[in-house]
Image: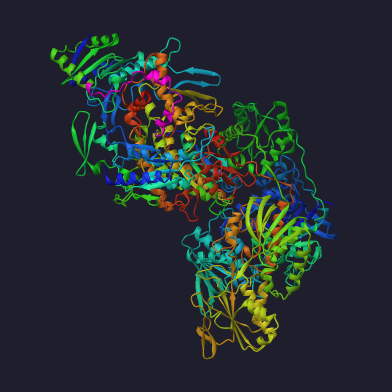
Amino acid sequence: MLQGLIKKEDLKKLIASVKKEGTFYGLIRGSEGLSLSELGPDDEVTLDYSNFKMPPKRQFFPFSEVICTYEDESMTDLPLSEEKAVIFGVRPCDALSLLYLDKIFIDEKFTDPYYRSRRDNSLIISLACREPLKTCFCTSVGASPAGKKGADILAFEVKDSLLFEACSEKGTRFMENYPAIFKKPGKADIKARDEEVSAAEKRVQTIDLSGITEKLQGCFDSPLWEEISQRCLGCGVCTYTCPTCHCFGLYDEKVELKGRRIRVQDSCMFPSFTLEASGHNPRTSNEERMRQRIMHKFRYTVENFEDIFCVGCGRCISNCPVNMDIRETLAEVIK
Amino acid sequence: MNKTVDNWEPKIVAFLCNWCSYAGADLAGVSRLQYPPNLRVIRVPCSGRINPLYIVKALQQGVDGVLVSGCHPGDCHYISGNLVARRKFALLKNFLAYLGIEPERVQFSWVSASEGSRFAALIEKVVDEVKELGPAKKLVKKGL
Amino acid sequence: MNNIEIKLKDLVKDLFAGEKIDVLIGYENGSLPLRSRPCFVHSAGEVDRLVWNSYCTNNLAVYLPRIFQRQEHKKEETPPPRVGIIAKGCDARSVVGLLKENQVIKENIIVIGMPCSGMIDPAKVEAALDGAGPYSCQGEVDGSLEVTTSSGEKKRLKREEVTAEACLECSHPLAEGADLQIEGEPKEACDERYEKIREFEAKSTEERWQSFVKEISKCIRCYACRQACPNCYCKICFVDQTKPRWIGASDELSNVMIYHIGRIFHQAGRCVECDACVHACPMDIDLRLFTQKLVKDVKELFDYVPGLSVEELPPLWTFKQDDSQSFITEP
Amino acid sequence: MHKKAMVIGGGIAGIQAALDLGEMGVETYLVEKGPSVGGRMAQLDKTFPTNDCAMCILSPKLVEVGSHPYVTIVSNAEVLSLEGSPCNFRVKVLKKPRYVDEDKCTGCGICMSKCPIKIPDPYNKGLSQTKCIRIPFPQAVPAIPIMDKETCRYHLTGKCRVCEKFCEVKAIDFEQKEQVLELEVGSVILACGSQEFNASLKNEYGYKLFPNVVTSIEFERILSASGPTSGHVVRPSDGKEPKRIAILQCVGSRETQAGNEHCSAICCMQAAKDAIITQEHLPEVQTAIFYMDVRAYGKGFDRFVDMAKEQHKTRFICGRIASVESNPHTDTLLIQYITQEGIINREEFDLLVLSVGLEPSESSMDAARRLVVFMDTRGFLETNTFRPVNTTRPGVFSCGSISGPKDIPESVMEASGAASAAAALLGELQSKEIRFEYPQELDIRGIPPRVGVFICRCGINIASTVDVPQVVEYVSRLPGVKHAQELLFACAQDSQKIIKAAIEEKGLNRIVVSACTPRTHEPMFQKTLKESGVNPYLFEFANIREQCSWVHQKEPEKATEKAKDLTRNSIVKVVFAEPLYKETLDVKKEALIIGGGLAGMTAALDLAEQNFQVHLVEKEKELGGNLRHVHTTLKGEESAPILKALDEEVNKNPRIKLYMNARIREISGYIGNFKTVLDPPLSEIEHGVVIIASGGEEYQPKEYLYGEDDRVVTQRELEDMLNGSDKSKLSSLATVVMIQCVGSRDDERTYCSRVCCSNAIKNAIKLKELNPRPAVYVLFRDIRTYGLKESFYRSAREKGIIFIRYDKEEKPDVHKNSNGLAVDVRDKILNKTLAINPDLLVLSAGIIPNPENKLLSQFLKVPLDPDGFFLEAHVKLRPVDFATDGVFVCGLAHYPKDIGETIAQARAAAGRAATVLSKDTIEAEGKVSYIREERCNGCGACVEVCVYNAIELDTEKRIATINEALCKGCGACAATCLASAIDLKGFRNEQILEALEAI
């Protein structure tokens, strides 16, 4: 396991080096708050944050993208992205979410070339979590503040430095590319890191999800859903800010003979999601939609991919306008 | 501002009510009054028919200006369609300007069936003002 | 438990006891600090869930249209319930608007007016804590809010500074016209309004456009603003319509802009300035900067304030012969 | 013979009469002496008191009459003789040559543009020039040029024929001859109108001597945007904007030296209107109107005059102009005038407008002579107060100003009334069935659009500017277009054959024609589609002439681009068009008439005569209403026998069912299908129309000691006394004072009650006739004996009745003193207060609306005006209709009016009602609104914005529902609906958005 220490102020050097081959994404705090942005060497990288608002799926699975254009009878696919990118500062929970998305978009039979080219061309550097939020519950769903899954490199804040630890071949190759930048960490650094990690892990609130999938298998027609969903406004905040939600729709836009096909993220919380061309809608109510979302994440994905598609980032909780709390919902199901 | 754009001619869409303004435009024609060829007319039965979204959509489609014209208050073939519309228009005009869309891009007027020359003068004025602004960029859909 | 809360619970219990209502829409404690959230109480036994505090930000009127909507998808229609609703000034104004637009059945609703002293805006608290939600809250002390951050730091925030904008500028804090009133000291009405709007108006066209671009660029099209708005009760919102499709589905900026222009314009003469949309927005878009402009214009042009009278026609449903037409182009 | 009639005169009255007859299924010839119908109204700029644009409201009527299947316009023609008897007339009509073949001409106007001879334009009163061969005005119907033989170069010199050379359809015919048509009709309506007084006869005002003296009709053209100066108000001498304008009233009216004795009835309001409009054009202008009396006697007139005074800075000067001088250097006018106080003033003006009166025209009098109907000594048609639309010859009716000066709504009312009378006469005859056989319509469901595009060259009108072949080439490549071609004249008959052939050969299912304005030719192409089995709404028109080639003559390339764009747009719109069908609904051929007064009875008899069942509801125990208190008319006709006869006729008519002492409990439904519950008998009746004739009441004065002193009575009470048994009391009177405007024109009721001046004069004269001794004083504000009533004012003064003007601010003071009753009034002419001790004080109490109007208006969802009278759909052209179809109003329910006017309006209401009842079904518009239920929230916004009451909320389903029969297709509901749950067929959101996308 390759490890390397880098002074926080030396991050700029790394950015400058990476810039020669590709793009470096990191977090900066601008007038509009925190955002994952393309960085130059002169930008001040922020390390002081809990997590950022929009999950990293947006880097690979944009809200909308043109996938082909057509004119008359001919159709042209859009070229694949060739941009090399390093994404720095993703939290471990979010890094894990990318593995789930890969299961959807990179499949032996059906691979999404646009998603795949972006994934293949990117390197993920996670930043271990020190200050979990009130809404975090990663440890209950298989993630953790210092989880490595999904990351190519996991970075830890250690005093005035960052400790980089390669978690994949890609990560190892990356670190080997910049021998001048990384120094070998000392024992004290490792110890400091270990302390931080265990402190953070302890602070994450937990919920007991044992048997959740089985419970869900038995409660499709439960009156529970109506009760739970009463308060829900039916917006798309939870799904759009969720790092694993990935449903989308296809739309055609045309001008005279020319047109383009666009893929746009969709949300199972919207009635239009299931609206059929005939006008029929099999899911007309909020409760059915709410049930679908929970079932999808905690039952269907387990049945199909053997994973709960939730990483416990808490975005759906903190952003919900009416404080729908998925932890409470799950607790209700289990009860 | 953008006067330097070569050979650029603004495209202006005009929503005209059938009974007054469209007839006024016809009269301008019958009277052979010459005005700039930048207008594309969409005939509607009444200015009251015009959903404010049409105007916004026109801007999104990349037209450089939108003109809406109906009957003068009192002349409406449908009694008060133009007066119901007037309230929407007043708010929309203010609102779009407030958002930073140049006010000259979206204009409202009244032209009666006997005002061929007013119609021609109106088009002259609107085209001039839009030319002054240059091609529309705001609110325009990308990739058209 | 505060005095108002006790009075409220007693009153609601009486309503259930007297079989006046089938359901009460009120607030309960949320799962996060500084959050009270909407709740539905179906019996006297559940009344103790109810709370009344400085975190009751949501506009509860948003639930009314759907409660009263005909349940066409259900095999058997149940008669519409009798509903009690706890109402701040803004919620009550929304109810008036909904009554006017036939979304609420007048005979089936009891509005309980609350003496609202202004609600705390969680977004303001978050901003004061560098963008993260508080880990816990110790309550109000001497006009300040005491909170602890995720890093364990304790902070005191001046109440005034974390009070929601809508509440600071509220012109009718009292739920006038409510069926029942809980006595108390509401906040004073604010007469000095629209200062921000006037400031914005004074900017150059370009500056205003840039601000608009900046705000709308944040939008993720989650429609939380729409879903939280009591006036946005359309069965199928214009953005979701096909044949014709008013707006492209992508997040191309012009699409997003037209969504917001359309939605906000649909509030013209209807918006009660509750800021439900603002509070719902996960991206902190300053929607108030735009919604309030129309409120101001409607007042100035048509001398109309929404939500105050059930009888008065909404301004865009009617006209006056001498309405302003200074906006008309004279060739 | 089937139902046939002839209307002579194509002004607004004639047009309305022809349209109403046509709608009643009467085949009608509309004979017009000029080249186009339209009359004087076509020359007006605006109309009072609403300042509506005259052409905006007239031109749809012109188009309608020009294309009505039951109306044939015979223009440039006059009637020579009328023989036979009612229901069996033979008319000889002389059709004069136009030198243009009406069948061939397409109205393209090329002849006009090429003709080298310029002549003064009669449409613009000679203030501008037109061509010797010309279409009389842009909206003319028929839109066919006429050649002025007197000035035609070819006719004068034998050389030229330029017009013939350029006419591609060979329509010019220099050899055209006069033609005499012999037509058979059942009844005739005379509507030949009047003419303006020749201001040259009053040479003291300098007309034709000084350039800046114009007549009011010339000024009307100057104000008009389509006039000689394009609506720039300038004075003729130097083209500069006038700063001071004088308008002189009563030029040729109310004086007998060179003019006419009668009042012309319209000039006061026209002057106020012109002052307002002028000030709107020139905010700084100062206008002074010199008048004798301000005769603002109609609905909303007084408010209009107040507006002129208060908001438009118009001075109203009661006085006459004595002399006019023109400064030879500046052409400024120095006007000397005498005020009513007798003061002589001199003032400079830049422009003097002479309000010329109306007088019988030579052609009207000729027509009257040829038809052998009697005229009065002035030359107006002789009519009886109780038979206002009848002439002296049975079967011949009249309307409009041929029987005395009157304004547009009265002319229109008389027109509908005359139409009703003419149709009633033909009651037993059958309507000619006009039925078009069309092939089975193509079912296009599931068939992709196959668009045929036809681009018209319009001779060279389009083709000389727009590169037509290029447009054809361009559009032929557009999606959905299966056929594109050019046509020399798309509207020509052979072009229709070409279009039909293309539809058949290529299986076209949607058609676009790029040509001229759809406003005139659309119905014709729609007919062609129908004849080919294509739904007529699968058609779009692109206007590349009026709105392209003619306005971009110097930019052919850009015009071509525009023509492509416009055509493409129409193609997109037609691709998204859907076949539409007009809903029809059955008509219950019965009428409900509310009110059994003169108006209600008259309307009931007219409808019954046309074989319709009538339900007449009267709240009192006897019929007659206010007429019971009117004993004689101003002309001296006795009303009692008339009332008795009416009462009997109504009572014995088997088609009239009377409900006495009855009230309306409930009315529901809509045109063709109303349901009303009456009490008694508390049963429901079904009917197709409603006529409101609920009358009005005399104001009960609270002022001038009325009710406190027996010597104070109202005019009505005086009239009862004059016609009662105790006349002896009256013969002993020494002094009688009458006070006008009691309860009228004050702050509480701002309107003029219209009849009180005539009533006072009638009673005053009667008093004098009874006993010439007493002094009779009439204290008035303005004497409003409008029209032919003026002669009675004159005769009253001749009989020694004393008229004293008072101001609203200085009302007479009535009190009791030792001498009995005392009236103090300030006489402005003498400039002192007169103290009169009458032994009878008569108050001219105004007419107030029926207090039950409010309830009725709620029942029927029709509006009231601010004064509480019913508000008609349009004050000028729809004086008895409401926006809500199938409901009509007449009599005092509408506004105070005299007997003749009431009868005319009642017959008009009957006529309008008959246009509904004579049909078995009513056909709705094709382009109407529809609801998309799945979107409708039931908020009710649409219900509020619909002025036609075509939308209701279904309380059960909580969604809006549209009654297509009532929808007029304005689309206000669709634009107001936030949920887009309402859309307008033919202008659907989808069509408009697609069209926008294609721009």
In this view, which residue lies farthest toward the right?
Answer: D84
Q: Position of residue D185 (x, y in %)?
A: 82, 55
Q: Is residue A245 left or right of residue D732?
A: left
In this view of the protein, can residue D144 be seen by the observer?
A: no
Q: Is residue D535 left or right of residue B9?
A: right
Q: Nearer the viewer, residue A151 or B41?
A: A151
Q: Position of residue A84 (x, y in %)?
A: 33, 16
Which quarter of the picture shows residue D882?
bottom right
Q: Position of residue B38 (x, y in %)?
A: 52, 38
Whether residue A210 appears in magenta in the rendering, the answer is yes
- Which span is picked out in magenta? A202-231
Task: Please say which color scheme the image uses.
Answer: rainbow
Whether residue A41 appears in magenta in the rendering, the answer is no
Q: Is residue D511 above or below residue D375?
A: above
Q: Is residue C38 above or below residue D8?
A: above
Q: Nearer the viewer, residue A77 or C298?
A: C298
Q: Nearer the viewer, residue D552 or A292?
A: A292
Q: Is residue A7 left or right of residue D155?
A: left
Q: Is residue D311 left or right of residue B78?
A: left
Count of residue discs: 0
In this view of the protein, can residue A67 be seen by the observer?
A: yes
Which quarter of the picture shows residue D229?
bottom right
Which quarter of the picture shows residue D424?
bottom right
Q: Position of residue A222 (x, y in %)?
A: 44, 26
Q: Is residue B107 above or below residue A284?
A: below
